[in-house]
Amino acid sequence: MNYRQRFTTIGWIGAALFLLGPMVFAWVLTEYLTAAASYSRPDEAWVYLSAMLAPLGALLALIGREYYDATAEVARARATREAQTRNIR
């Protein structure tokens, strides 16, 4: 049997958080550091929460996977490849 894996909805959310989390963190941290001299400084909690987006995304991507039986899919791909090889010769 051949098994493959794919993302569930939670896995796709985790992948998005893992990729977008560092950008959100950089934006929040830039806002926090550049607002140091003004009176509209954002709360530190946003900095801490945005720092947790990438690790949370990695965890969700790890949890949000499912395995499925790909035996028929692999057999179809093998048959197609063999048919293409015969047509080339």
Image (cartoon, rainbow, N blue to C red):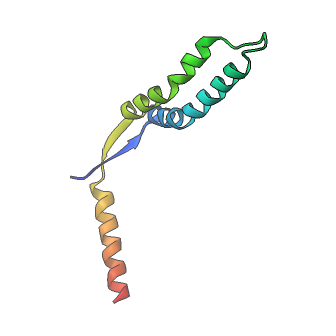
Up/down of 2 relative to 27, above or below:
below
Q: Quadrant of residue 81?
A: bottom left
Residue 21: image location, x then y, percent: 55, 31
Up/down of 74 relative to 31, above or below:
below
Up/down of 36 relative to 70, above or below:
above
Residue 30: image location, x then y, percent: 67, 26
**What residue is rendered at 42% in x and 29% in y?**
60
**What residue is rendered at 78% in x and 13% in y?**
38
Which residue is most to the bottom?
A: 89
**In this rendering, position of residue 35 left or right of residue 4:** right
**Foreground of the two, 13 or 19:** 19
**In this rendering, position of residue 36 left or right of residue 49:** right
Which residue is most to the left?
A: 1
- Number of numbered discs visible in the structure rendering: 0
Residue 13: image location, x then y, percent: 51, 33
Residue 59: image location, x then y, percent: 40, 29
Q: On the rendered image, what quadrant is the C terminus found in? A: bottom left
